[in-house]
Amino acid sequence: MNKIQINRIKDQSFGILGLLATLSGLVLLSFFIGQIFYEGCSRIDFNFLQDLPSRKPEKAGIFTAWTGTLWVLCLTTLFAFPLGVSAGIYLEEYLKKSKLADLLEINISNLAGVPSIIYGLLGLEIFGRILHLKNSLLAGALTLALLILPIIIVATREAIRAVPNSLRMASYGLGASKWQTIWNQVLPASLGGILTGVILAISRAVGETAPLIVIGALAYVPFAPSSPMDEFTVLPIQIFNWISRPQHGFSVNAAAAIIILLGITFTMNGIAMLLRSKWQKKINW
Amino acid sequence: MNENEYKIQAKNVDVYYGDKKALSNINLSIIPNTITAFIGPSGCGKSTFLRLLNRMNDYIDVFSMKGTITIDGKDIYKPKVLVEDLRTNVGMVFQKPNPFPKSIFENVAYGLKIQGVKDKKFISERVEIALKQAALWEEVKDDLKKSALSLSGGQQQRLCIARALAVDPDVILMDEPTSSLDPISTAKIEDLIFELKEKYTIVMVTHNMQQAGRISDHTAFFYMGELIEFGKTTEIFTNPKQTKTQNYITGRFG
């Protein structure tokens, strides 16, 4: 065997190794999803979505959980979207290069890596205790907004940075102010990227459990929230609670709730992908 | 010629990028309704000087300058000058065509819209006039709603010229406007520039010596941040006073 043949074999064996590496994750995930669907699919019906929690597994539903999740989703977006995008615009377009700017940048990147339980403790102290929001929806949504703020900021900055500078110069050259340039040129050109980042961040918030447990979101809430000041629960907490019970009926319930939760996050990721491809088609440099 | 008759006057202009001196002691006066070409090797400061005239260097963090630049007798670097105003008077066309990713119509109307012009009829009139001036109207009049990015490179550059003309400036700055275009598009743009000098004062940077010779009235030769020679194009090209100019023009360096 000569050198070239040996290299060929190395080539092929890496190809096989890479395929196995790729498949290992996917196979495990699809096995898990298959298991969940097998167990929980038959449990999902109209009553399951409409029923309140109960001690009897066949009577328990996820009405309070999914309405709570929906509330949290909307409120979190309401806080995190404007704050995150504004901060991203400021950092990218207004802030001049300096030591302070570098420090800000490093800290925001670091914030994105802080464990979510820490955010929960922060939220508990600031929103729950100091601002007396207790274990309300508002406290939970503010905490989650804080958690995903760095992700939105980073995504906004990346989307804005991808806008070619020649576009800004063309706008300035025609007598546009900085804000006119940002509003008319930079934001429309980067909106696809920004929205994608925001949606992915929110779909992460929807799946978060730890910080909400710390805040005091309850597993047993006998009524659906009707205002931001109400107590609440969310799907992941409901799932966590059901799984930890001994009766088999509850683990079936958990599987069914997982399917609903996965449905929500997959839908959101799908929307994000759709937006990205739509914007890419509209704008090609 | 009387001082007040100059359109643009630069006096003792120094430019620094941080500690690095990019231009030193530039003195230059430009007469209205003429085409002035800046030539010189890359990095000689000609583009820097061009961008001084509509304050585009302001966006470079480390930029600073000394001296005065006046347009119509007014110092454009005085603190109370509004750069937005200045730039509607001094338009700019860039090296690479950079239309906005919007329709042809919206590209040309952009300058008016950001000034707050609401009158739709006035805007569409101005758009038509500007596109005609830029010799693009006949080619695009039926698809004004089409994306500007669907135009060819040469058409895009003429669109950028139309976009600059639509806000009715006095001065148009062009930074190597044909360097990314093919010879046919280049010829069209050159014809266009030549016609535009009837109404506008044009200052352009070019790497193409023949282009400077063909269309400009005056030529300025920059070298290492200094203005080596400035005069009538015919004289610069046939009878330069400085040996550096002669060497550059004849292609001995640069």
Image (cartoon, coloured by chain):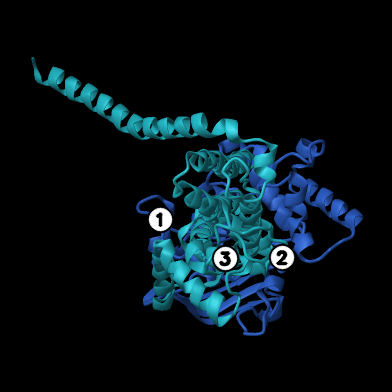
Chain colours: A cyan, B blue
Residue B51 image-quadrant placement: bottom right
Could you tell me how far apart the alpha carbons at marks 1 and 3 are, in whole angstroms? 71 Å
* Cα–Cα gap, marks 3 and 2: 13 Å
Q: Position of residue A91 (x, y in %)?
A: 51, 68
Does residue B176 appear anywhere in the picture? Answer: no
Circles 3 and 2 on the same chain = yes
**Who's the residue at 55% across and 39% down the image?**
A256
* A72 lies above or below B89: above
Output the chain of dot 2: A
For the residue pair A117 and B235, the one nearer the viewer reads as: A117
* Residue kind at label 3, given as amino acid type: Gly
Q: Amino acid at mark 2?
A: Ser
Q: Are marks 1 and 3 in contact (CB under 8 Å)?
A: no
Q: Which residue is mark 3?
A: A140
Find disc 2 in the rendering and name its residue. A227
Q: Chain of mark 1?
A: B
Label 3 element class: helix
The kind of secondary structure element at disc 1 is helix
Q: Report x, y in % for residue A275.
A: 62, 43
Q: Residue at x 42, y 76 (%)?
A: A98
Looking at the image, is B193 positioned above or below residue B13?
above
* Quadrant into which the N terminus of chain B falls: bottom right
Q: Which residue is mark 1?
A: B248
Three-letter amino acid code at the position of disc 1:
Tyr
